[in-house]
Image (cartoon, helix red, strand yellow):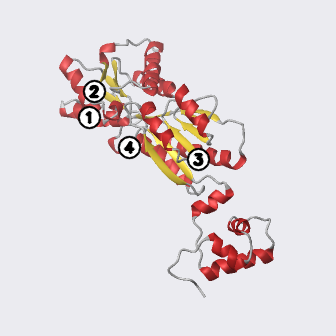
Amino acid sequence: MKIKNKKITIYEVAQRAGVAISTVSRVLNNSPNVSEKTKNKVNEAIAELNFRPQVSARKLASREPQMLAIAVPSFTTPYFNEVLKGVKDEIKEMDLDILIYNTGSKNPNEGIENFFYRGTADTVITISIEITEEVHNNLQASHVPTVLIGSSHPDYDYFEFNNRKGGFLAGEHLVKQGYERLGMIRPAINTRSSAEREQGFIEALREFKMPVEKKFFVSGDSTKHAGYTEEAGYEAVYKYDDMGDFPDAIFCSNDTQAIGAYHALTKLGLKIPDDIGIMGYDNIKFTKYLDLTTIDQRMYSVGVSATKRLAEIIRTETDTKVQTINDPVLVQRGSTKKSKT
């Protein structure tokens, strides 16, 4: 006979089966340390009482992690979306709930303080969060398995991006395409990744004996998402228009900037790629349909790899660190194919 309209607890299952609560817990967690006869008795009691164990209770009994917290500056931009898709698709294999904490783009390290105060997570992935001494101390105090994406620290497993190489690839490509006066659209708020991309870009220009014209290194006024937006790219192009001088080609700090810049250039009557070349960074899906040259960081696969590594840490509790720097690749499309004259 099944009991209805009442929440059945593990205590009642133990009483019906005539065993200890700890025995019921072992059965629920498929422990080998229970005889077949006792297991059958407990399962019969579960069926008779129509008992439905809470996942959290089962995991607590087995000391398994329940919650993965992802700290990320934004979950609405295409770049972060691609990384999060990789995490989401891989996390299905780990039986974890996901909590996404938006630290904010303007000052993510300040926003992450609230994340630690909540204390709800027992595994952590950070995306594009700089591991300052304060963040490091908080992570250490939390004692939870942690994997970093888009940043690095010697005490953690991480999957970092080689932004400097990506910037170099952009500069090298534009020079080889025959563009001579090169510009860059920066974010409104400087970040480590954008600074590294700019550094690599300048290194390429110098290696190929091209002028570095700082007046062509501009940013939009919009600070939303730190200036990595379509609006910021659009605004930056009009700064070239205001100065009455345009570079031959523009390297944008990310693809969303490039989309806004592309629109502004066409509104001004400039033909891409002959009058001016343009390229982005990240290889988000929309760039394929805009025929936009870009730099591919393989964000989705990095999200998958980081999540797989987190599963290994949970499963093996190893002290060995996986610390990877992922090299980007150039994706050449029509927006930088200058006609030979």
Residue visible at 69% across and 50% down in the picture: 315
Residue ID at (77%, 75%): 38
Question: Mark 1: which amino acid?
Answer: Glu
> In which quarter of the view is residue 332 placed?
top left
Mark 3 = which residue?
Answer: 122
Specify the label residue 288 is tagged with.
4
Marks 1/2 in contact by CB < 8 Å: the verdict is yes
- The amino acid pointed to by label 3 is Asp
| Residue type pointed to by label 4 | Lys
Tell me: 5 left or right of 179: right
| Mark pair 1, 3: CA separation | 38 Å
Q: Which of the 4 quarters of the picture holds residue 339?
A: top left
| Left or right, 51 with reference to 118 | right
- Identify the mark nearer the N-term, 3 or 2: 3
Disc 2 on helix, strand or loop?
loop
Nearer the observer: mark 4 or 1; the answer is 1
Q: Earlier in the sequence, mark 1 or mark 2?
A: 2
Q: Mark 4 or mark 3, which is nearer the start of the sequence?
A: 3
Q: Nearer the viewer, residue 266 or 176?
A: 266
Counting other residues with Cα less than 10 Å from the Cα at mark 3, is it few (<14), some (14-19), or many (20 or more)? some
Q: Nearer the viewer, mark 2 or mark 4?
A: 2
Given the image, on which type of amino acid does mark 2 rest?
Gly
The residue carrying mark 2 is 220
Q: CA distance from mark 4 to mark 1?
A: 20 Å
Q: Position of residue 331 (x, y in %)?
A: 45, 36
> Picture coordinates of residue 102 (x, y %)?
42, 42
